[in-house]
Amino acid sequence: MANPLWLRSFQALVEQGNFTRAAERLDLTQAAVSQHIQRLEAELGLLFIRRPRRLELTPAGHALLDYLNERERVDQRLTQRLAGDLDDHGEISLMTPGSIGLAIYPRLLALQKRAPGLAIRHRFGPTREIVEAVIDGKVEMGLVGERPDDASLTVSEFATEALELVVPANTRVETFDDLMALGFIDHPDGKALATRLLSRRFPGSPGYARWPRSGFTNQIGLILAPVAQGLGFSVLPRFAREAFEDQHAIRVVEGAPEVSDTLYLIQRAEWPLSARAQRALSVMREAVAGADTAL
């Protein structure tokens, strides 16, 4: 690859937007930065379009910037892995579905507060993206709602999460018509989750397409806000319901049969979890179990 000094000049020029500020940032002359860019462009092609008062990256410039950003991420992961197997220092990276994420993220932040040398990098995502991120090494571990069939992964059961029918606290619900009178608060997984639960609780009842809808949100932490206001009912996983702040304003309608999903922990098979990830995993299990054990 090109001379590292030339690449530093390229990055500084992208960040600063002009040669003068880039040179000041690098403590070089403007002529030196210009020469570095010229040598890069001799190897890689035109990187910048020079316009009055601004620079615009060409496709080749964007490609080089993407390469440098990815190399920086790889270097960071390598540094973390070689830093020593410490449980109080380094990055803890994971991806989860939204519901379980609401349950574990506050506990992980509490862990970080006790061990400031840790950095929590947590993302929400669907199963497909989580599996890809773990396989590609973008995160160290993930939780998914479907058991992946991939030999490169180690998969273990993490928790069981029940689906819950949630209504306003003071609302009486005995029949399916009582729910329809409220209206459904929908969300991205609403059709799948509610159909699975209500088709078993109320056999023979009309399907999703015929339900009146009282609202929709794609923010899992807000699904129960309209329910708490008496505006409808919803169906969502238990951990999402437990994370809702105003528990007094909602009520779970108990019934049979129960419908639950299994959550699976996944990691790369050939990479044992770091000590910090194992510590985080212990905290995550406590959160799921509802334990009050100190972090």
Image (spheres, helix red, strand yellow):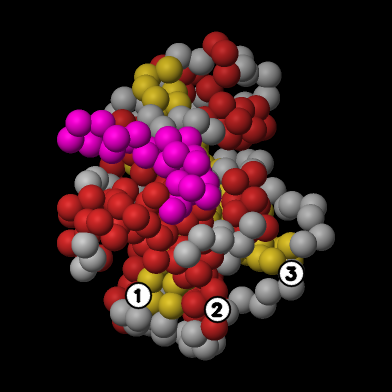
Front position in the image: 278 or 67:
67
| Amino acid at circle 1 | Gln
Q: Is residue 94 above or below residue 112?
A: above
Q: Residues within 10 Å of mark 1 (few under 14, many from 20)?
A: some
Residue 277 lies in the magenta-colored region: no
Q: Is residue 181 above or below residue 271?
A: above
- Helix, strand, or loop for circle 2? helix
Looking at the rendering, the stretch of residues picked out in magenta corresponds to 39-64
Q: Residues within 10 Å of mark 2 (few under 14, many from 20)?
A: some
Q: Residue furthest top?
A: 210
| Amino acid at circle 3 | Ala
| Rendering coords of residue 97 (x, y %) | 53, 49
Label 3 vs 1, first from the N-terminus = 1
- Helix, strand, or loop for circle 3? loop
Lateral position of residue 181 relative to residue 246, left or right: right
Please tell me which residue is depicted at 47% across the width and 56% down the height of the picture. Answer: 68
Using the image, tell me which numbered label, if any, was put on residue 81: 2
Q: CA distance from mark 3 to mark 1?
A: 26 Å
Label 3 vs 2, first from the N-terminus = 2
Are discs 3 and 2 less than 8 Å apart at CB?
A: no
Label 2 vs 1, first from the N-terminus = 2
Please tell me which residue is depicted at 56% across the width and 61% down the height of the picture. Answer: 1
Please tell me which residue is depicted at 74% across the width and 62% down the height of the picture. Answer: 153
Q: Is residue 71 above or below residue 238?
A: below
Reading the image, the residue beneath label 1 is 112
